[in-house]
Image (cartoon, coloured by chain):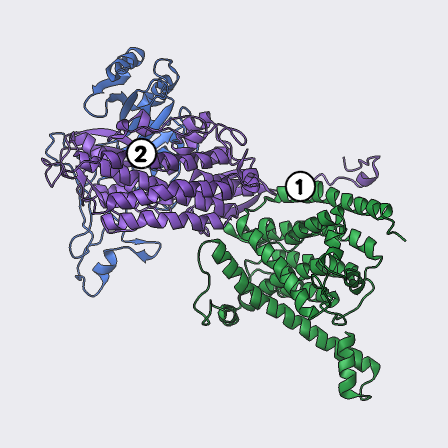
């Protein structure tokens, strides 16, 4: 073997047959400049090609589920904000619906409508961050600033509603904590009217930009089978071509009264389930959220915002129930075990990003490092809800 | 397909390993822990069941669960008003359990599986070969509750640090006073000049759980 | 440099020998060029931040210095000079310290042959254009040194990519200037500029379609050469982790920054001299040649900034594909086309 000499001139030397090479083990460490949160990706690469990705999580673990066993159902609402801190209204919504399902209590109409409006506005705000930071990962600095400009308006509305810009604690078991302020409908209509035009702006600047399409189309393909197997939900599942949305297929609250479409990936720019599809699903979901908000505003009645016959200390009957709702990142589920007392026996939170991140272990190998970055960005994960 | 019908089907297949039907909110079946993986396989592969989606896998500690509905179950140990960690001599008893929430996209039906295992030997077969998403959920259940999943490809802690001792979501879990030489909340107060001299601090836990 | 040597000759009369005049003149020009580089850094960091701000629907620096934060670069410089100089424990110290200097020198040397105004050129080489390209590729060694000596895997990644990118994009960069050299019949920068006198339509960029294409290609290649804009994969892998200058702090990091903005202005100056008529105005007689030259170069710099803040980043393999499979063939086509054009219009000879 060592005496092998080829007839080709440029191969005239012996090939060293005992050249030791190994994969390069690098850390996309817990500190990421911009976005994602404290996630550590342990990556084994051969040059640019990734051979293995292992996400390491738990840097933000606060064991909120243990805290749940020590406080009331109403008190724990505050902790749900801190899961997906980019979409706290959706977290609040999920938990409120979960407990209300166990109690069997009917939420007043006005509260339901305001809830839907808040949840959809929150969905828009969350997707704005997803788009902006995804563009940032691709090197497009400007769309981020534009997205934050619009998000600012939504945050202002939420601040007037609940007092907080990022963490709201606005929903309550059985309704809402505060009523909508005077001028709420006008403010919401203002932002919705601008939103549709601005989404067109983002499309011009980023979505159909040739460089962006080349970076994201045919990259990080997660097909429907992988989604089912790894429990991916939300825009990841819809990007893979599966038109499944909890709001339509497992309806809660008053979503069955509204008319809206479920955008899903069709492989428009590349393959079904690539990064571009997931990105575009989010863009189109923003349009649909605007539609829902308009319908909810039109139909919003006056009335109370809290269920009347609900005690301050809420005690769901004995048993357990898993309830899921559609957050901006996917399906947020609460599996609550009750013993009839004021505190839950066990409150398990099933977060969408937890499973969405898991699929990276399957999809990562074979990508280039830049593609890995693109894929992680397209999954739109929030470490707050992964680690809880 | 109705949950009761699914329960019937499973009972026909697995006989005594499928225990009673759990009615009420989370409808499902209590099953013997040893057969969980096979039952899961049937639930996924059987045409009329077709549960291709595991929505949620929960590990929990049934220690001191009071079924009377008066809410007298064992609570958690926390900190008192002075910031001293509460201690307890109570040794955990009762069983550990796992709950699976399943959904079928094709049929649109839901089902739950409940399995219980003894505290001293909490072994449940892993369903990660049936639903790959379970790999991480089971790691979390192991991490926080201490249920061991046999046949799991990579059972190690996922949220807590690799060298953490104890399983926090157990009812008899007591906060360690110090971790890697950092005094944790409450204990540092107790040791400070405002604390009492003879405060009894809990042992950082001699549990066998943890580590890769 | 004749300007300098003449100036010194007037000042010292016969007191200095011709060699002494040369040395004095050369040192002064070197000093002036260094000052130009420093000025680039100061002016263009502010410009970049303001341009970025306005594109992104915000203001940029506003407070330092009364008017729109004009003293911001001064504040930045004071801050950087005050930083602790950290060298990683396992870093290769000599290489670590040498790398920024090599990059800086590579840039400074190239300034020697830029024709700002008639007579105001540090070294009027007959090989001017060739010299510029040859000398600015020395920076590649500096980048590799920086990445390797940092003892950081991500720095190494950035350095490897950066080196590959710079080396590759030099080819379309140089090739796109060949039609100009064919037209002028000389590599001398002064000759190239002088040949473009007589108003805007005499500028080489408007000479024929192939030269227009060559200018476009030069512009794109120059952005890639400076590691900017859509081609900044080597250094702004810092979105996620780090670029080749991650382990540098304080003044050493400032050198990298200085070199980047100086390079930005350098390639714009080359483009101005080679394609856009150098110091010749749009129409009319030559008036304030230095100012005209600088204005044209600054406009190109602004264009580069505009491109950077608008477009996303190309992936490394896409970058290389663009260079080798798109730009090199196109530049060769330009050379061929320009040659045929010249033969057809009888300009050869």
In this picture, residue C42 sits left or right of residue B173: right
Q: Which residue is mark 1?
A: C321
Disc 2 packing (10 Å; few <14; some 14–19; many ≥20): many
- Residue sitting at 82 percent across and 88 percent down? C14
Task: Give the numbered dot on residue C196.
Answer: none
CA separation, marks 2 and 1?
45 Å
Residue drawn where x is 24% and y is 45% of the image? A184
Tell me the shade of chain C. green
Residue positioned 24% across, 18% down in the render: B19
Task: Give the colour chain B carries in the figure.
Answer: blue
Residue hosting label 2? A292
Which chain corresponds to the colour purple? A
Front residue (pair B15, C328): C328
Q: Nearer the viewer, residue C334 or B138?
A: C334
What secondary structure is found at the residue carrying circle 2?
helix
In the rendered view, does C176 fall on the left or right side of C224? right
Which of A20 and A229 lies nearest the eye of the viewer? A229
User: In the figure, C110 relative to A177: above or below?
Assistant: below
Q: Which quadrant of the structure image shows residue A288?
A: top left
Q: Is residue C196 visible?
A: yes
């Amino acid at each position: 073997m060592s005496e092998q000499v080829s007839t080709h001139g440029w191969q005239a030397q012996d090939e060293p047959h005992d050249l030791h090479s190994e994969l390069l083990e690098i850390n996309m460490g817990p500190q990421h400049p911009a976005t994602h949160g404290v996630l550590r990706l342990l990556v084994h690469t051969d040059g640019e090609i990734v051979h293995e990705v292992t996400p390491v999580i738990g840097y933000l673990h606060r064991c909120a589920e243990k805290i749940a066993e020590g406080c009331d159902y109403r008190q724990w609402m505050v902790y749900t904000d801190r899961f997906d801190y980019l979409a706290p209204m959706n977290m609040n919504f999920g938990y409120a619906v979960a407990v209300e399902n166990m109690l069997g209590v009917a939420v007043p109409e006005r509260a339901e409508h305001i809830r839907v409006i808040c949840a959809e506005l929150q969905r828009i705000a969350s997707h704005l961050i997803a788009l902006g930071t995804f563009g940032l990962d691709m090197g497009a600095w400007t769309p981020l600033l534009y997205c934050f400009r619009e998000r600012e308006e939504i945050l202002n509305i939420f601040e007037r509603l609940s007092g907080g810009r990022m963490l709201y604690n606005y929903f309550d078991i059985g309704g809402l904590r505060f009523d909508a302020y005077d001028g709420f409908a006008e403010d919401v209509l203002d932002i919705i009217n601008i939103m549709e035009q601005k989404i067109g702006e983002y499309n011009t600047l980023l979505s159909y930009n040739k460089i962006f399409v080349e970076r994201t189309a045919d990259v990080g393909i997660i097909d429907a089978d992988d989604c089912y197997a790894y429990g991916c939900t939300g825009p990841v599942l819809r990007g893979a071509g599966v038109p499944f949305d909890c709001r339509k297929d497992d309806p809660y609250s008053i979503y069955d009264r509204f008319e809206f479409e479920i955008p899903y990936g069709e492989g428009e720019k590349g393959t079904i389930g690539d990064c571009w599809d997931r990105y575009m699903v989010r863009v189109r979901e923003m349009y649909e959220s605007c539609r829902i908000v308009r319908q909810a505003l039109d139909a919003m009645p006056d009335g109370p915002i809290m269920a009347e016959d609900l005690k301050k200390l809420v005690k769901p009957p004995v048993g357990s129930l898993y309830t899921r709702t559609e957050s901006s990142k996917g399906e947020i589920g609460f599996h609550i075990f009750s013993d009839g007392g004021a505190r839950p026996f066990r409150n398990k939170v099933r977060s969408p990003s937890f499973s969405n991140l898991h699929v990276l272990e399957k999809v990562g190998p074979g990508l280039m490092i830049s593609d890995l970055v693109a894929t992680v960005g397209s999954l739109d994960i929030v470490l707050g809800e992964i680690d809880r | 397909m109705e949950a009761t019908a699914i329960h019937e089907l499973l009972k026909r297949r697995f006989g005594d390993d499928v225990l009673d039907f759990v009615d009420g909110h989370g409808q499902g079946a209590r099953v013997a822990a040893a057969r969980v993986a096979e039952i899961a396989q049937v639930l996924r592969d059987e045409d009329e069941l077709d549960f291709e989606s595991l929505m949620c896998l929960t590990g929990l500690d049934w220690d001191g669960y009071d079924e009377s509905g008066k809410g007298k179950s064992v609570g958690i140990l926390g900190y008192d008003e002075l910031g001293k960690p509460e201690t307890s001599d109570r040794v955990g008893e009762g069983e550990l359990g796992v709950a699976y929430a399943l959904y079928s996209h094709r049929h649109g039906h839901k089902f739950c599986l409940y399995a219980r295992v003894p505290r001293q030997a909490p072994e449940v077969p892993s369903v990660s070969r049936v639903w790959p998403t379970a790999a991480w959920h089971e790691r979390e259940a192991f991490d926080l509750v201490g249920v061991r999943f046999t046949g799991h490809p990579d059972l190690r802690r996922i949220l807590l640090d690799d060298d953490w001792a104890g399983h926090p979501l157990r009812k008899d879990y007591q906060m360690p006073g110090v971790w890697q030489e950092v005094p944790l909340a409450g204990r540092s107060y107790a040791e400070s000049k405002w604390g009492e001299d003879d405060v009894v601090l809990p042992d950082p836990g001699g549990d066998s759980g943890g580590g890769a | 440099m004749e300007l300098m040597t003449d100036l010194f000759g007037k000042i010292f009369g016969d007191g200095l020998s011709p060699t002494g005049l040369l040395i004095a003149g050369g040192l002064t020009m070197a000093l002036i060029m260094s000052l130009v580089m420093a000025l680039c850094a100061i002016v263009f960091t502010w410009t970049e931040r303001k341009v970025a701000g306005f594109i992104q629907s915000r203001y940029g620096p506003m407070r330092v210095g009364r008017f729109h934060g004009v003293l911001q670069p001064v504040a930045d410089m004071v801050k950087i000079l005050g930083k602790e100089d950290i060298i990683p424990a396992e870093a290769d110290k000599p290489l670590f310290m040498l790398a920024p200097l090599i990059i800086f020198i590579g840039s400074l040397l190239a300034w020697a042959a830029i024709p700002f105004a008639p007579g105001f050129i540090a070294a009027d080489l007959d090989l001017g254009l060739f010299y510029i390209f040859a000398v600015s590729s020395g920076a590649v060694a500096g980048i590799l040194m920086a990445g390797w000596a940092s003892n950081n895997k991500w720095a190494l990644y950035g350095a490897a990519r950066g080196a590959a990118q710079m080396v590759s994009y030099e080819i379309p960069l140089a090739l796109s200037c060949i039609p100009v050299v064919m037209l002028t019949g000389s590599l001398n920068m002064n000759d190239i500029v002088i040949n473009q006198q007589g108003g805007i339509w005499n500028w080489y960029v408007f000479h024929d379609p192939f030269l227009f294409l060559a200018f476009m290609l030069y512009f794109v290649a120059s952005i890639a050469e400076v590691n900017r804009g859509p081609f900044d994969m080597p250094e702004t892998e810092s979105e996620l982790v780090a670029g080749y200058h991650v382990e540098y702090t304080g003044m050493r990091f400032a050198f990298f920054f200085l070199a980047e903005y100086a390079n930005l202005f350098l390639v714009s100056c080359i483009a101005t001299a080679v394609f856009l008529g150098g110091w010749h105005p749009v129409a009319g007689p030559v008036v304030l040649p230095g100012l005209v030259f600088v204005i044209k170069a600054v406009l190109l710099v602004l264009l580069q900034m505009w491109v950077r803040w608008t477009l996303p980043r190309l992936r490394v393999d896409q970058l290389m594909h663009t260079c080798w499979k798109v730009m090199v063939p196109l530049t060769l086509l330009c050379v061929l086309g320009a040659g045929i054009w010249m033969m057809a219009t009888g300009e050869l000879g």
